[in-house]
Image (cartoon, helix red, strand yellow):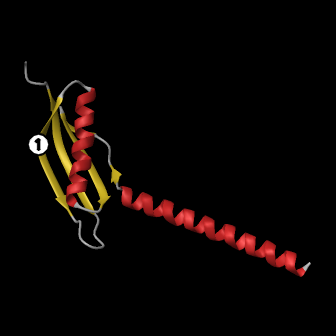
Amino acid sequence: MKALRIITEDAMKTERDKDVRRMTLLLMALILAGCSTGVVSIAPDTYMVGSSGNNSQAGAKADVYREASEYCSQQGKHLNEVKITSRGGYPFVPASAELHFRCVAPPPK
């Protein structure tokens, strides 16, 4: 009976350890994935998108350009940058970027 209890307790501990590892990995993935504000209208025909939590400024900038370009493409237009700012990306300081942009008609062919 004592052996059965030890096996059961060991199995429960193993399952708890697995759950803790899964939650830790999920939390790390969410932190490393970065967050985006989504596209926000800030003036007539002018928009802003931000990204934070990236490992590098280049990664943060790529995220905002990608999201803004996709937003303009859905309207059949091209991205026209107005202003971009970025900061961080050092140890213990996640990188962030903010892009102000317009969606403009593609050039005639």
Q: Which residue is mark 1?
A: 82
Is 107 rendered above or below residue 47? Answer: above
Query: At 33% from the left edge and 49% from the top edge, which residue is drawn?
Result: 36
Q: Position of residue 106 (x, y in %)?
A: 12, 25
Q: Which image quadrant: the N terminus? A: bottom right
Query: At 23% from the left edge and 31% from the top edge, which residue is drawn?
Result: 72
Q: Position of residue 74 (x, y in %)?
A: 28, 28
Residue closer to the observer: 2 or 40: 2
Which residue reaches farthest top?
A: 109
Is 90 rendered above or below residue 3? Answer: above
Which three-letter amino acid code belongs to the residue tagged 1? Val
Query: At 18% from the left edge and 58% from the top edge, which residue is drawn?
Result: 86
Q: Position of residue 23 (x, y in %)?
A: 55, 63
Quadrant of the rendered image containing residue 9: bottom right
Q: Is residue 61 left or right of residue 27?
A: left
Q: Position of residue 69 (x, y in %)?
A: 22, 37
Label 1 crowd (10 A; few <14 / some 14-19 / many >=20): few
Quadrant of the rendered image containing residue 109: top left
Query: At 20% from the left edge and 56% from the top edge, which residue is drawn?
Result: 58
